[in-house]
Image (spheres, grey):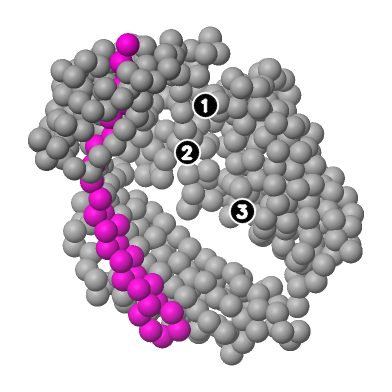
């Protein structure tokens, strides 16, 4: 961390010497390793280490963001001097400046536990063995004779960064992540080739689930797609599996950022305090979750990380505002990007939610489609299973759901107790009433 701190501090000093009124720099280093195994053979091994420094320049009311991977002293000095000179040619923008230093104050003392101290002990042999175990388990499932292909992967990464501002901020981050997964394709009776997958990730290698479990799940999910057909068009309850719910939610949150709000390209602009969802929609941004994929003590602008509400009882309460757009909107900044999402969970799991539905559809995949950030209209392809008398029935495919986010989320009828652990969105199983399905 000390070398990165030195690099960031030097970049800021060089920028000020070259004439920048304010400057910020973030020096980083990241290592990524992955192994891919396909149908009994090693397919790829990849290892990459990247490093560099990103520099934000505030020069005579003008702003530029530049980066370089050449950290040699002479090269960095020349790069920064040229970047400052180029910044002077950019149009002025009175809203551009570093954050108020008061916003750096108050960092939490919570231990986020984002780094596996044993990262360096992981060997190439271990990664390959995990990829092999994933395939072996995927092929050791009843019905596996239908398998056409199995692709598995094992990957890990470690990242470090240090950020320095000319107006007082200084802070570093370190973290690791481990992932494993399997993708399976099978032969259907009509010639189609259904595919599905399973994967898992964690900050610590010891927290990963057993590779055999993930491999089996991939095949079981794929075999369950055999014989899928298009269901009838109808308005029905929808149980949205926690693994895919984050994608639908992302369309609701995408317009909840400074750019779309300030430029009036968001269907949520001007609706703060308004009821957007049902009373069950309680959602916060929580950067202080130990072990979370989005956890942090400070954000990309150095702002001390704090939990804040996005929706309470369905009413819109907060947005993602960086310093620049907060100034334009006359608001206080929150943060530019999502960390982890925290839901107010219910008391039922997916099985119980399915059991509560006499007739409906369990959606386990969202495919293609679009969502208009300006109007809120959306249409998404879905696949899943019919729900009949509270039980999972026949597999369904080639269907769509459509609606408008301003009315759709008011149909949220139940929130599960099972937040998806392998995503920063941590979405639980969700039950919606009266969803428009398009099929036959």
Disc 2, SS: loop
Residue that carries the numbered disc 2 in the rendered image: 340
Q: What stretch is highlighted in magenta?
A: 31-60
Q: What residue do we see at 23% from left, 43% from top? A: 69
Q: Which of marks 2 and 1 is in front?
A: 1
- Residue 327 visible in the snapshot: yes
Other-residue count near label 1 (Cα within 10 Å), few / some / many at <14 / 14–19 / ≥20: many
Question: Element type at marker 3?
Answer: loop
- Whichever of labels 2 and 1 marks the residue nearer the N terminus, that label is 1
Determine whether 405 is above or below 101 in the image.
Answer: below
Who comes first in sequence, dot 3 or dot 1?
3
Measuring 89% from the left and 54% from the top, which residue is drawn there? 234
Q: Which of 143 and 323 is in front in this view?
A: 323
Q: Which residue is drawn at 69% across and 73% down?
A: 225
Q: Distance between the residues labelled 2 and 3?
A: 16 Å
Q: Indicate the secondary structure of the residue bearing disc 1.
A: loop
Which secondary structure class fits the magenta region best? Answer: strand
For this orientation, the residue located farthest to the bottom is: 145
The reply, left or right, for residue 75 in relation to residue 434 is left
Write down the residue under mark 1: 320
Q: Position of residue 46 (x, y in %)?
A: 30, 66
Q: Can residue 206 be seen in this view?
A: no
Q: Which of 346 and 266 is in front in this view?
A: 266
Numbered tag placed on residue 244 in the rendering: 3
Residue 411 picture location, percent across and down: 78, 38
């Amino acid at each position: 961390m000390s070398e990165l701190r030195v690099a960031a501090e030097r970049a800021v000093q060089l920028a000020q010497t070259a004439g920048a009124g304010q400057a910020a720099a973030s020096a980083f280093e990241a290592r990524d390793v992955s192994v891919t195994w396909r149908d009994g053979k090693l397919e790829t091994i990849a290892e990459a280490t990247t490093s560099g420094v990103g520099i934000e320049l505030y020069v005579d009311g003008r702003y530029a963001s530049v980066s370089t991977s050449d950290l040699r002293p002479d090269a960095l000095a020349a790069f920064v001097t040229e970047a400052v000179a180029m910044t002077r040619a950019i149009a002025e923008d009175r809203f551009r400046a570093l954050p108020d230093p008061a916003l750096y104050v108050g960092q939490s003392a919570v231990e986020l536990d984002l780094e596996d101290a044993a990262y360096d002990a992981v060997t190439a042999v271990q990664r390959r063995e995990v990829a092999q175990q994933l395939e072996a388990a995927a092929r050791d499932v009843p019905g596996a004779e239908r398998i056409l292909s199995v692709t598995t992967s094992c990957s890990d990464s470690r990242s470090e960064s240090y950020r320095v501002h000319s107006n007082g901020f200084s802070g570093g981050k370190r973290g690791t992540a481990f992932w494993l997964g399997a993708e399976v394709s099978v032969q259907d009776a009509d010639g189609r080739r259904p595919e599905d997958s399973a994967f898992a990730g964690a900050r610590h290698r010891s927290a990963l689930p057993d590779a055999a479990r993930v491999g089996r799940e991939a095949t079981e999910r794929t075999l369950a797609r055999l014989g899928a057909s298009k269901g009838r068009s109808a308005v029905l309850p929808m149980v949205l599996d926690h693994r895919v719910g984050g994608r639908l939610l992302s369309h609701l949150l995408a317009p909840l950022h400074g750019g779309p709000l300030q430029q009036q390209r968001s269907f949520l602009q001007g609706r703060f305090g308004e009821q957007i969802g049902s009373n069950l929609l309680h959602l916060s941004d929580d950067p202080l979750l130990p072990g979370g994929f989005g956890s942090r003590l400070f954000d990309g602008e150095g702002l001390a990380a704090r939990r804040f509400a996005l929706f309470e009882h369905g009413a819109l309460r907060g947005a993602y505002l960086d310093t620049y757009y907060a100034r334009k909107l006359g608001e206080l900044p929150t943060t530019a990007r999502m960390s982890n999402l925290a839901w107010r969970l219910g008391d039922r799991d997916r099985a119980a939610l399915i059991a509560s539905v006499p007739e409906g559809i369990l959606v386990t995949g969202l495919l293609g489609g679009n969502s208009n950030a300006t109007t809120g209209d959306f249409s998404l392809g879905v696949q899943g299973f019919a729900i009949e008398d509270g039980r999972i029935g026949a597999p369904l495919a080639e269907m769509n759901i459509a609606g408008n986010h301003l009315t759709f989320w008011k149909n949220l009828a139940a929130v599960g107790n099972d937040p998806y652990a392998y995503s920063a969105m941590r979405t639980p199983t969700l039950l919606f009433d009266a969803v428009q399905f398009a099929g036959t």
